[in-house]
Image (spheres, rainbow, N blue to C red):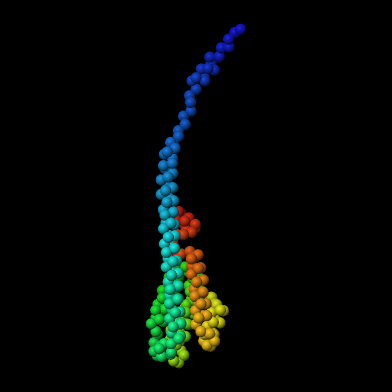
Amino acid sequence: MEATVPKPGVMATQEIEPTPFRWRIPTPIVVAVLGIVLGSWLLPAFTRQWDDRQRAGEVKASVVAEIASTTGRALLDAHQASMADAAARSSGRAIPPAGKEWSVANMEIRARLRAYFGAKAVEHWALVSQYVTSSLSVAYRGPDGAAVIPNPWVSRTMRSPQLELLFRKLLSGEEGFEGLEIAILSEAEKLTSSLLGMHVRGYSTTSRDFVADLFP
């Protein structure tokens, strides 16, 4: 029986065929480069979102607290003044201290709402403030029955049938301040609740803001 001898030509070809060279970037280098690129690109956007969300929350809390305290204090002053006689309430046509304090606070809140939340929030505040101002005017009106506190902000787009009815009853003497106070505070609470869900202008807090930070 003859042994099979491999053909020299085939064996030689297999032995001398060169192995193709494949160039590879080491995995640690790839990971490091990607980390640097993504970190320098994504990290600033994530950082701004985190910081701005905290600051936007602080703005909301500050405005909400200011609305609640200012409105409550003004209505309390109006209630107390309504129980005093006309001479004690007002001296001629001078604006009482409570009215001056309210007027300044009213303008400050309006300015902050316009700067941070926009026209819708301003209009809602105008609805609340017009009834607070009117309540103070009724409480501090002089002996001639005329209001002594100016009312510059009146909502042009929002109305409240309940507040209108209660205010008419207050003017006619059918009801006192209690019902109107509660209704005004309830409307102010609606405003503050809506503010908590609104976007704060000038702060990066939404997904659209995040994309804008990545591709300015």
Q: Nearer the viewer, residue 79 or 127?
A: 79
Q: Nearer the viewer, residue 156 or 62?
A: 62
* Callout count: 0
**Is residue 123 in view from this perspective?**
no
Q: Residue furthest top?
A: 1
Residue depicted at x 45% and y 92%: 144
Residue 94 in percent (x, y) is at 39, 87
Q: Nearer the viewer, residue 177 or 206?
A: 177
Image quarter of the C terminus: bottom left
Q: Nearer the viewer, residue 80 or 66?
A: 80
4 up-or-down from 171: above or below: above
Residue depicted at x 42% and y 71%: 66
117 up-or-down from 89: above or below: above
Residue 135 in percent (x, y) is at 47, 82
Image quarter of the N terminus: top right
Specify the quadrant of the image occupied by residue 114.
Answer: bottom left
Residue depicted at x 43% and y 56%: 50
Residue depicted at x 41% and y 87%: 89
Residue 155 in percent (x, y) is at 50, 77
Specify the quadrant of the image occupied by residue 35.
Answer: top left
**Is residue 174 in view from this perspective?**
yes
Q: Residue furthest right?
A: 1
